[in-house]
Amino acid sequence: SNWAAAWYLMQFNHVSKPVSSVTAQLNVSFLAPTSSKRELTLEATLIDVSERKAVIAGFVKVNDLITVKSEGTFVVVKPDHIAYGQWS
């Protein structure tokens, strides 16, 4: 979800590299057992984006069955934040 947020924030802000952002909120629901012995599909969908925030829905699927779902809010940080510049 964080990489999806980085991409959508780049597109929204018309920049060529990821902006510095952090996870503000992340909710995860485990819906069914998820075997590490099977192929997993990871998906992320944009819920909302603005200049400083992206909200992303994430999903883990096994054979088209959603086993995990999440919703995360990711916010852009300013130069005085400890995480600023960590993408480069």
Image (cartoon, helix red, strand yellow):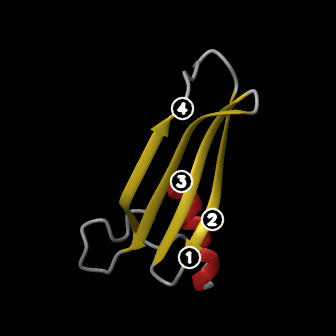
Q: Which mark is residue 46?
A: 2
Residue at 70% from the left image edge and 24% from the top image edge = 39
Residue type at mark 3 is Ser
Q: Earlier in the sequence, mark 1 or mark 4?
A: 4
Crowd band around label 3 with a 10 angstrom C-alpha radius: few (<14), some (14–19), many (20+): many
Residue type at mark 1 is Val
Q: CA distance from mark 1 to mark 4?
A: 26 Å
- Residue 7 location, x and y as percent? 61, 66
Q: CA distance from mark 2 to mark 4?
A: 21 Å
Element on which disc 4 rests: loop
Evaluate if marks 2 and 1 touch, with contact meaning CB atoms under 8 Å apart.
yes
Q: CA distance from mark 3 to mark 1?
A: 13 Å
Q: CA distance from mark 2 to mark 3?
A: 9 Å
Residue at 58% from the left image edge and 19% from the top image edge = 36
Element on which disc 2 rests: strand
Residue type at mark 2 is Leu
Q: Name the residue beneath numbered marker 3.
A: 1
Location of residue 24 with respect to 67 vertically, above or below: below
Q: Which mark is residue 31?
A: 4
- Residue 82 location, x and y as percent? 24, 67
Q: Residue furthest right?
A: 64
Q: Earlier in the sequence, mark 2 or mark 3?
A: 3
- Residue 67 location, x and y as percent? 59, 32
Give 16 or 64, whichever is nearer the viewer: 64
- Residue 42 location, x and y as percent? 65, 41
Residue type at mark 4 is Leu
Q: Please tell me in which quadrant of the rendered image residue 21 appears.
A: bottom left
Q: CA distance from mark 3 to mark 4?
A: 18 Å
